[in-house]
Amino acid sequence: MPPERRSRRRPDRRTGARPDRRVGAGPGGPPRKAAPSSQRKPPARPSAAAAAMAVAAAAAEERRLRQRNRLTLEEDKPAVERCLEELVFGGGEDDEDALLQRLGGPRVQAQEDSGDSEVENEAKDNFPPQKKPVWVDEEDEDEEMVDMMNNRFRKDMMKNASESKLSKEELQKRLKEEFQHAMGGVPSWAETKKRKTSSDDESEEDEDDLLQRTGNFISTSTSLPKGILKMKNCQHANAERPTTARISSVQFHPRAQVVMVAALDNTVSLFQVDGKTNPKIQSIYLENFPIFKACFSANGEVVLATSTHSKVLYVYDMLAGKLIPVHQVRGLKEKIVRSFEVSPDGSFLLIKGVAGYCHLLAMKTKELIGSMKINGRVAASTFSSDSKKVYASSADGEVYVWDVNSRKCLNRFVDEGSLYGLSIATSRNGQYVACGSNCGVVNIYSQDSCLQETNPKPIKAVMNLVTGATSLTFNATSEILAIASDKMKEAVRLVHLPSCTVFSNFPVIKKKNISLVHTMDFSPRSGYFALGNEKGKALMYRLHHYSDF
């Protein structure tokens, strides 16, 4: 191969020269200089990061231009239209929280006041508009005053001399306070909130009540504490009809806030119990009929009364206002009818007879159902709390238990330490039987032991009386047993159950205003305790532990 041809095909490696057609000039042009090998670089390819940055820059520029155009267009739009577009389209933001915040925030007013700033308008939007009353009565603004001095009932409600006149609203509040004070609280029938049936709803209601009040959340126990009984001396039950005759019966009405007082002066009186004046409702006079005992029926619609020297049984129907004498009961051969008992369910009437007889009568028809006889003389008798059994205490110190339906003797046991029984009582909860003897000892038994054993051991022998225990009465909750003797003055005690201890603060020996106690009774919910003495006074006490009548 010729040398010139070889040089044309292979460039010089030392200088890096290209063939003449590469480094030379184009056709008809001047020749080009070949670039040195140190300054020449191969062409670089674009990287992925640079491409991504370019795309992001282009997108940001496009958003900036759109935002500028949108702001330019919205300058001429009213505020309402701008608000609607922001609510519907989100104002160009994709944040859901920001959108919900705008939806829940204050609305822009349709017509803005030109004189108010944006801060003032926003503050106004935060407050709801106040509604104006549609109609106003001018007489409501003139508050009518009620005269308190010229009314004897309102006069007692005055706290000081400056309250000679009160507004109707203040008088209503004062009457409500007096009523709640007399009742010992708000009675259940006056509560506005209805109790829920399900246990879950009751628990939720209790939690709501707990969160809606302040103060000490530690409440006292519902059970009656022993030791000291909180009580207050009230006005005498028969203060509006005083008498000097011996009080033979005191009993509270089973359904109404009424107390009955019967005395040897031939009268039976009914009084409204308020703890202050106890106004008289009605008095019934029975001619030549010294009342030995008077008693309400179980439903409280009838009053029964017997005399000290007659076999007539008077029945007074309070609803009809009729007095019905029962002169003779067919099959009953008693010459004098004195002591009797009404069953708790109101179905039976038990009359104590002579020669150890107890006669069972139908309460509705006053007809004889059957008779039960014990050994010796019947000293006292009573029904069980379920009206299915009769307890009869004999003069020999024994107690007989009879079945009402079959009139058969279920058990017979000896009252421990008793030589002569005087009184007997059963508790409302069916747990206790109390027997009083002539020596003043009151034995408290369990009813189960009285039905199964012939020589039951008493739970407690109360020996606080030194003369014969002639009266025994349990309260409605079976937490108090009242014992009394009509042979000695101030001989009355209140026994706490189940501790069987005597309350130390009753009676107050220094005052000595109780005298000889012949009858006692508790109100249906134990809010009041009453007793009658030989001086014609029916003393009444308010027991603060129990809120209801």
Image (cartoon, rainbow, N blue to C red):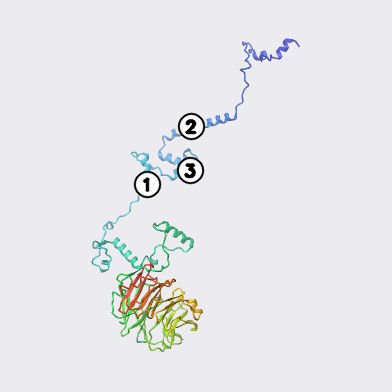
Residue that appears at 44% across and 34% down: 71
Q: Secondary structure at mark 2?
A: helix
Q: Which residue type carries mark 3? A: Asp
Residue 148 coordinates in the image, percent (x, y): 25, 65
Residue 234 coordinates in the image, percent (x, y): 32, 70
- Out of 292 and 246, give the one closest to the viewer: 246
- Mark 1–mark 2 Cα distance, whole angstroms, equals 38 Å
Name above or below for residue 324 compared with residue 225. below
**Cβ–Cβ under 8 Å for marks 1 and 3:** no
Res 64 label: 2
Res 97 label: 3
Q: Which residue type carries mark 2? A: Arg
Q: Is 238 on the left or on the right of 422, as rendered? A: left
Residue that appears at 40% across and 39% down: 79
The residue identified by callout 1 is 127
Res 302 label: none
Q: Residues within 10 Å of mark 2 (few under 14, many from 20)?
A: few
Q: Is 50 on the left or on the right of 217, as rendered? A: right
First in sequence, mark 1 or 2: give its number: 2
First in sequence, mark 1 or 3: give its number: 3
